[in-house]
Amino acid sequence: MKRLLKQPFWQGAIVVAIAYVVFKYLIGYALPIIGVSSAPVPSSVILQYMLTVFVGVLLYMSAEEGRWGTFQKPIKEAMVSRDQKNLRGVLMVVIPIMVGWLAYQNVKPSFAAPATLRSIHPAPPNEITFRGLPIQLTGLENPLHENGSLEEHLQVGKAIYVKNCVPCHGDLLDGAGHFAQVFNPIPADFTNSGTLPMLTESFVFWRIAKGGPGLPQEGTPWDSAMPAWENILDENEIWSVILFLYDQTGFSPRTWHEEGEEGGEEH
Amino acid sequence: MRKTVRRMVVLITGFLMGFSVVSGQDVEAGKVVYDKWCAECHGIDGLGDGSAATTMLPRPRDFSQARYQIRTTGSGQLPTDDDLRLAIQEGLPGTTMPGWPNLSGPETEDVIAYVKSLSRFFGQGDPPQSLDFGSDPGGGSEAIEIGAQAYLTLECEACHGSAGRGEGTSSPTLEDWRGFPIRAADLTEGWYLNGGGSVEDIHARVLTGLDGTPMPAASDAMNAGVVSPDEVWQLAHYIASLGSAEMPTLRDVVRVARVEGTLPTDGSEAEWEGVDTFYFPLAGQVIQPPRNFAPTVDGVYVQGLHDGVDIVLRVQWHDPSESPDPAWDEWQVKFMNAIDLDGDSLVVDSLEAPMVRPPDALAVQFPFEIPEGTERPYFLMGDARNPVYLWTWNDQSGIGAGRGRGLDSVEELPEDPVTGNATWEDGRWTLYFRRAVTMEGDGLSFQEGTAIPVAFLAWDGSSGEVGKRNSISSWYYMLLDKPASSTVVVAPLIAILLTGALGLVLVRRAQDRERG
């Protein structure tokens, strides 16, 4: 076993195998188990990634004369050695069949939906028009922190949430409302640590006010069922429901300070 | 299976908690949980009148009267703590009441105590006792046949209908104890049943009844000797056999198979038997006002065939009323008064007013052209910039086609050659659309072997659904089979031969070189 691991050919084979397992299974199926949101990688993308890994391995192996020699050794042996006659026979049958199978996978009629790539938190604009009036998003804070009673704002926000948002985002704020299964993309899960804590309140305001139709192209605005709430809720109502979202989930919004430090979503 | 495991966990926690039920339940702590998670629906005093309650049918439970559906106790009895725990942890599918797995064990116990404290009926007399459920004599075709007989004997048909889709003649008159209209459950879609769709679940609901609804308890008939305990189990097996407990898996591409010979048009059930059926759940249109919070149609079943010249789509959905139907006038008035119409004007608030009876309707939506990239029209019937191509049907004007530029902006395309017909039977519409695969002029030309976006919209007239108040789906795809081609066999064969030959050459050369 140890000897095998020292041999560059098997090192390369193991790297390729691990890469395949990561792309095919880990990203799409294992990450969600530990709570990171993810989706299976489309097979065309896997093919691209695998080619890159393969070429990378070959480049590394051939970068040094000595390594290249040892790398080739098992291959040469399988091709010429008298002792490897049986292995040779098996490979001569198995490899063409595998290639044939790959070819079949490519030409057989496919009933998979075309892959669409979608940006989940696209960059927000600097400014939006809300019911005809301009609102500067950059640097914008939730005005209700400074105004009136938090208790009351939360009560307003909660009533708005339960009436308007529950059907999709769910009573548990987990994106699993009674209509959620119908929509694709599925409604956002606010209990996920990758959502609310990563966003400033102004970003959340933009997403609520402008909804699916207000997304940039990379957010596939034609698919998103998120309503443009400016047609139903006024400014204070939206800020109240934002307060409720953070309060009910126990998360804190991203601040403009943090945003500045990491360069944030601004481009 | 998953459900069974979850249920066992519930039972075990229940068992562990059982010893400390009284001391382990803290009403004060329960109020904190209740106010945070439950009050907006069930009301701050538990009267089922939370601020969002008017958007929901069935309404959130009024706890003050302590009428519960999920019980193992007799009709009219209080539920046990185990019953309440099950209802809270698993929720009531098909309603807005979800399960609450986010609450910890102690939080759940506390909220149970608080919910009980909202009614003066708990804590009086002996604690409620579960009924003896007997044991399941087993399923199988014979049991199902006996069950079907019991279904007739006990007159379940009056409400649930002969097909079990809730299309019984009493259906339009049903109301719950608070006077809100209530539908007889669609027994063929087990995944939407409040108490779950397994035989045990159904048996428990049928035996003990659903208190607060018109649904009677079979235990009364059983005690009167009309049916035996075994027959009640067999009735549950019969109901479970009407549908599945789990929602069909969602597949996002409708395969439209290619047939040689004639296409079934208005074909009999038999002609469509072997054709793959795709189920798509629908939701109320809750995106643009006036919104539809409590839709009737919650799914469509879609099949398709083509012969290279014509394409036929067959769409089926459950709707207990064949609207317009005067038998449902009373229902329509009650329903529209009970639900928040979100500012819609079509309110007929009394039976004396002149009746407006909207027809049932359905639309299949495509883009006008097969999209080049990923962009497609807005899924809610398109928009001004990017319209959708619609096949439409309603129970008054029949089949047509249209250009949609938004939910309230549909322009008819009278020249479109799409034809079809619809029939309603036992609570189910079966609708056919037929058109040429390719098309001159305004309208989509289908292309074999290319995924084409498709979506569905439905209206139930008897619940006052018109215009924007409807049921919607998101975009899915439709794919027409290409004619059978020889490439599928030839290409892999060539690949095998070439690789084999290449392998031979390489090995031969390597060996020659080795020998020098």
Image (spheres, coloured by chain):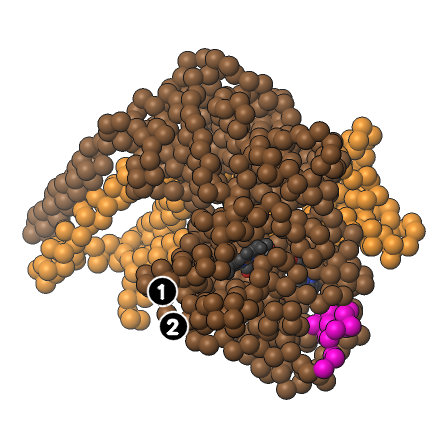
Q: Give the mark nearer the N terminus: 2 vs 1.
A: 2
Residue of label 1: B143
Which residue is situated farthest in the right direction here?
A148
Q: Nearer the viewer, residue B260 or A199?
A: B260
Shade representing chain B: brown
Quarter of the view holding residue B296: top right
Q: Nearer the viewer, residue A164 or A100?
A: A164
**Can the viewer see residue A229?**
no
Label 1, secondary structure: give it.
Answer: helix
Quadrant of the drawing holding the C terminus of chain A:
top right
B4 to the left or right of B262: right
Which one of the lettered chains is coloured orange? A
A224 to the left or right of A29: right
What residue is shown at x 14% (from left), y 44% (from top)?
Answer: B500
Magenta part of the protein: which range?
A: B110-125
How many dots with numbers?
2
Q: Residues within 10 Å of mark 1 (few under 14, many from 20)?
A: many
The x, y position of residue B326, in whole percent, is 60, 35
The x, y position of residue A53, in whole percent, is 39, 49
What residue is shown at x 42% (from left), y 54% (from top)?
Answer: B242
Residue of label 2: B137
**Can the viewer see residue B337?**
yes
A50 is within the stretch colored magenta: no
* Chain for disc number 1: B
Mark 1 residue type: Ala
Q: Are marks 2 and 1 in contact (CB under 8 Å)?
A: yes
B350 to the left or right of A122: right
Q: Nearer the viewer, residue A198 or A83?
A: A198
